[in-house]
Image (tube, grey):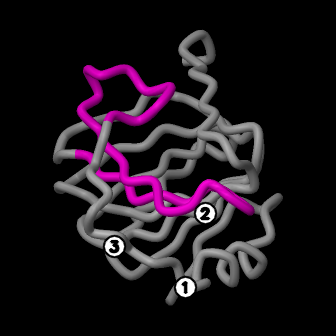
């Protein structure tokens, strides 16, 4: 599986972490994502909060997550659909499609655009979902 990465992240470390087998429980429903405005229309299913947070997230086509960052490194594994991750530091945009991963370094400001209905796995070095919205940097 190809891994795209911001230069300050260690993609191999996160590839191993997100490849670990986690039980995908069907009895767990998708719910609103903590720290996300409801108007963004996303939902998540928490798979594992420890030893690190791991969840399945989904967003409908056309949604744009405004500039934001996480205090820890995050690994995104796209399960279905296509998304663009915009790195504002390098002014580059990365298309990430089903079967691909993208590692985002801690505190790295980025934007996400969902080109299709998209479902992805989100794993981070934390036990909490923490997002800082960077509206003033736009």
- Callout 2 secondary element: strand
**Alpha carbons under labels 3 and 2: distance apart:** 13 Å
Query: 10 Å neighbourhood of mark 2: few (<14), some, or many (≥20)?
Result: many
Q: Nearer the viewer, mark 2 or mark 1?
A: 1
Query: 10 Å neighbourhood of mark 3: few (<14), some, or many (≥20)?
Result: some
Contact flag, marks 3 and 1 (Cβ < 8 Å): no
Which residue has dot 2 on it?
A: 75
Residue 117, by quadrant, is bottom left
Image position of 52 (left or right of 76):
right
For marks 3 and 1 on the same chain, the one whose residue lies earlier in the sequence: 1
In the displayed orientation, state which residue is furthest to the bottom. 1
Contact flag, marks 2 and 1 (Cβ < 8 Å): no
Q: Which residues are magenta?
A: 32-59
Which residue has dot 1 on it?
A: 21
**Alpha carbons under labels 2 and 1: distance apart:** 15 Å
User: Which residue shows up at 64% across the image and 63% down it?
Assistant: 103
Which residue has dot 3 on it?
A: 79
Residue 107 painted magenta: no
User: Which residue shows up at 45% across the image and 64% down it?
Assistant: 121
Q: Is residue 108 above or below residue 36?
A: below
| Residue 8 locus on image (x, y percent) | 82, 58
- Callout 1 secondary element: loop
Q: Quadrant of the C terminus?
A: top right
């Amino acid at each position: 599986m190809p891994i795209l990465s911001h230069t300050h992240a260690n993609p191999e470390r996160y590839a191993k972490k997100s490849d670990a087998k986690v039980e995908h429980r069907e009895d767990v429903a998708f719910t609103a994502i903590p720290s996300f405005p409801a108007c963004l229309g996303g939902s998540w299913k928490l798979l594992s909060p420890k030893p690190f947070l791991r969840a399945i997230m989904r967003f409908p086509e056309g949604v744009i997550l405004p500039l934001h960052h996480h205090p820890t490194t995050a690994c995104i594994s796209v399960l279905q659909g296509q998304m663009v991750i915009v790195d504002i530091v390098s002014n580059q945009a990365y298309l990430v499609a089903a079967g691909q991963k993208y590692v985002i370094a801690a505190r790295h400001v980025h934007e996400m655009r969902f080109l299709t209905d998209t479902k992805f796995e989100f794993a981070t070095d934390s036990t909490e979902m923490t997002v800082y919205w960077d509206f003033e940097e736009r």
